Image: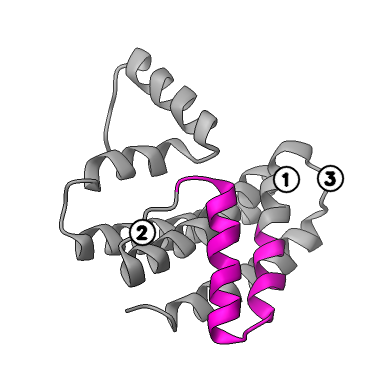
Amino acid sequence: MLVLPESVLEKFRRLAEAEGIQVEELIVEKLVSDLDPEVRVEAYWEMSRTYFKQAEEELAKGDLKQASEKLWGSAALAVKAVAYGREGRRLTGHGELWEYVNKLIEETGNEELGSLWRTAISMHVNFYEGWAPGEEIERALKKVAGFIEELEKLKK
C-alpha cells in the first residue's frame, strides 16, 4: 500500500476530479507515462480488473455509489487499454472515450458496444446522483463485464 502525505493526496484528488477519473488512475497514469507501451497497456487492463473487483465488493457491501463509480472506471480503463494497445493513443477525457467507442463500433460493426458503454456511463452518473437501485447496479455489473469481454477481443 502506498502512503502519501495528505497535501499531496489532496492535490491528486483535485487533479483527478478535474479529469473526471479516480485518484488511483491518475497516479497510475503519471507512473506509467514513460514506460514501455506494453507495460502501460497492461497497467490499464490491471486497473480495469481491479476496479471491477472493487465494484463487486462495494455492491456486496451495499455501497451502490462506489460500486457504480468503480464500474464506470473499469469500463473507461478498458477503453483506454484498447486505444493505447492498438494505436498508442492516450485517451484523456470523456469525449475522447465516447469518440473511441464509436470508432470501435464502426470498425467492428458491433452495435452492442454502444449499448454496453451507455450502461457504464450511467454508472458514472449514478455515482453523483445516487438514483439507481441495487438491482440496476447488479444488471449494470453484468453488462459492464460483457463490455470488457468484448473489448478484450479487440486487444492487440
**Residue at the image position 59 percent from the left and 79 percent from the top:** 106
Residue 27 in the image: state x and y as whole percent.
33, 38
**Residue at the image position 48 percent from the left and 55 percent from the top:** 51
Residue at numbered disc 3: 131
Query: Would residue 128 be found to the left or right of residue 132 on screen?
Result: left
User: In the rendered view, would you say 60 is above or below 116?
Assistant: above
What whole-number distance in Å separates the C-alpha atoms at marks 3 and 1? 9 Å
Tag 3 and tag 2, C-beta contact below 8 Å: no
Q: Nearer the viewer, mark 1 or mark 2?
A: 2
- Whichever of labels 3 and 1 marks the residue nearer the N terminus, that label is 1
Range of residues picked out in magenta: 92-120
Q: Amino acid at mark 3?
A: Trp
**Residue at the image position 28 percent from the left and 39 percent from the top:** 30
Residue 137 in the image: state x and y as whole percent.
73, 59
Q: Nearer the viewer, residue 64 or 33?
A: 33
Tag 1 and tag 2, C-beta contact below 8 Å: no
For the question of whether residue 61 can be seen, the reply is no
> In the image as oriented, which residue stretches furthest toward the top?
7
Residue at numbered disc 1: 125
